[in-house]
Amino acid sequence: MNDLDFVTIGQKIKERRQALAVTQEAIANQLNVNPSHVSNIECGRANPSLTLLVKIADILKCSVDFFIGGEYTFAINKEQEKTLDDKIMDKLKYCDIDKKMKVLKMIDIL
């Protein structure tokens, strides 16, 4: 895994803060840090700890994933994640009513 891109994370923090019209000073006060530290985080000059990132997300009313979502390197195969029930429903979705009735009768027989 590569290091986290703290510049991008800082940009996302800044964008969210500005969207909510929250000042760096207000965040700094709630975190008990200097406003320049918040500025350094937003510019990527300082790397927030996980604890601080969680607190920032809480202040900005979002999840930590909002800031680091683009950092994931694994690919999710949505087809593998589906349950058997979901797969059956997907197949039935495009069937006409007659086929659906036949499937229902077959299920009842089982």
Image (cartoon, helix red, strand yellow):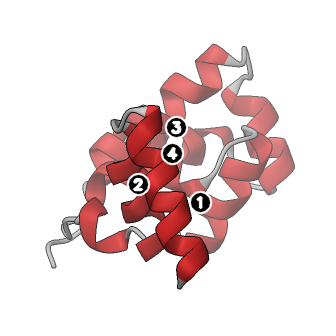
The residue that label 3 is drawn on is 13
Q: Secondary structure at mark 4?
A: helix
| Real-space Cα separation, disc 1 to disc 2, in angstroms | 10 Å
The residue that label 2 is drawn on is 68
- Residue 6, numbered circle: none
- Of circles 3 and 4, the one toward us is 4
| Real-space Cα separation, disc 3 to disc 4, in angstroms | 9 Å
Amino acid type of the residue tagged 3 in the rendering: Ile
- Residue 53, numbered circle: 1
- Of circles 3 and 2, the one toward us is 2
The residue that label 4 is drawn on is 66
Give the image location of residue 12, x and y in percent. 44, 35
Pointer 1 with pointer 2, Cβ within 8 A: yes
Pointer 2 with pointer 4, Cβ within 8 A: yes
Q: Secondary structure at mark 1?
A: helix
Q: What residue is at 32 percent from the left and 52 percent from the top? A: 91
Left-right relation of 10 to 50: left
Residue sitting farthest toward the right: 30
The N terminus: image quadrant = bottom left
- Of circles 1 and 4, the one toward us is 4
Q: Could you classify mark 1 by the number of other residues whose Cα lies within 10 Å: few (under 14), some (14-19), or many (20 or more)?
A: some
Closer to the chain start, of discs 3 and 4, is 3
Residue sitting farthest toward the bottom: 110
Closer to the chain start, of discs 3 and 2, is 3
| Real-space Cα separation, disc 3 to disc 1, in angstroms | 9 Å
Amino acid type of the residue tagged 4 in the rendering: Phe
